[in-house]
């Protein structure tokens, strides 16, 4: 008879000891990326709402069509991503106070918009472009 000695079975490692190297960083990093994603979504939503407003769209179209701004900045004139300010609406009335940068091939400017909405119609009290390079202030409500 051939006698065999029982060989020791290797002990099976626990799930944690086999997987901690990928699981621990995932548990730490996932919440960070989730928070960054939520913040990015909120910022994009706010800027999207401001850029989708009538005062922003009207002022950008006015800036792009104004020959004085075209002469200073060149064409095409594009708006920057960031828009600062506020828009408050309540039914058919409201107010807006915005500023944002525009740029063309020859330079950039900051556009300021102050408007009030009454009976569903926007009235612009200030609509100006300040050209950065020359310091020129162009009143966009006056004809060139």
Image: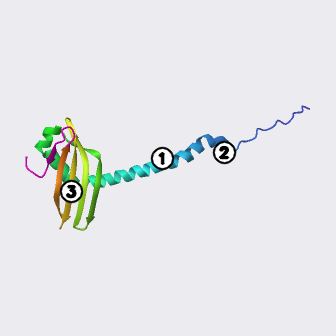
> For numbered disc 1, what is the local secondary structure?
helix
> For numbered disc 3, what is the local secondary structure?
strand
Q: Would you say 20 lies left or right of 8 here?
A: left
Q: Residues within 10 Å of mark 1 (few under 14, many from 20)?
A: few
Q: Could you tell me which residue is drawn at 39 percent across and 51 percent down?
A: 41
- The residue identified by callout 2 is 16
> For numbered disc 2, what is the local secondary structure?
helix
> Do callouts 1 and 2 mark residues in contact (Cβ within 8 Å)?
no
35 in magenta = no
Marks 2 and 3, Cα distance to the nearest angstrom?
60 Å
- The residue identified by callout 1 is 33
Q: Residues within 10 Å of mark 2 (few under 14, many from 20)?
A: few
Comparing marks 3 and 1, which lies closer to the viewer? 3
In which quadrant of the rendered view does residue 116 lie? bottom left
Comparing marks 2 and 3, which lies closer to the viewer? 3
Residue at the far right in the pictured view: 1
Q: Could you tell me which residue is drawn at 25 percent across and 50 percent down?
A: 99
Q: Could you tell me which residue is drawn at 17 percent across and 50 percent down?
A: 128
Q: Would you say 109 lies left or right of 12 here?
A: left
Comparing marks 1 and 2, which lies closer to the viewer? 1
Position of residue 40 measured from the top left corner of the image (x, y, whole percent): 40, 49
Position of residue 64 measured from the top left corner of the image (x, y, whole percent): 16, 45
Disc with the residue nearer the chain's start (1 vs 2): 2
Position of residue 132 measured from the top left corner of the image (x, y, whole percent): 22, 40
Disc with the residue nearer the chain's start (3 vs 1): 1
In which quadrant of the rendered view does residue 24 lie? top right
Start and end of the magenta stretch? Answer: 131-144
- The residue identified by callout 3 is 114
Marks 3 and 1, Cα distance to the nearest angstrom?
37 Å
Quarter that holds the N terminus: top right
Disc with the residue nearer the chain's start (2 vs 3): 2
* Numbered label tally: 3
């Amino acid at each position: 008879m051939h006698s065999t000695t029982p060989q020791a079975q290797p002990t099976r490692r626990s799930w944690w000891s086999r997987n901690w190297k990928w699981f621990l960083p995932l548990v730490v990093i996932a919440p960070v990326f989730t928070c960054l994603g939520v913040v990015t979504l909120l910022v994009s939503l706010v800027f999207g709402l401001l850029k989708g407003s009538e005062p922003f769209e009207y002022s950008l179209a006015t800036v792009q069509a104004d020959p004085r701004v075209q002469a200073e900045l060149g064409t095409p004139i594009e708006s920057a991503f960031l828009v600062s300010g506020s828009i408050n609406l309540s039914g058919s009335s409201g107010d807006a106070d915005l500023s944002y940068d525009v740029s063309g091939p020859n330079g950039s400017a900051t556009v300021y918009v102050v408007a009030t909405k009454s009976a569903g119609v926007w009235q612009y009290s200030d609509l100006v472009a300040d050209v950065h390079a020359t310091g020129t202030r162009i009143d966009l409500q006056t004809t060139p």
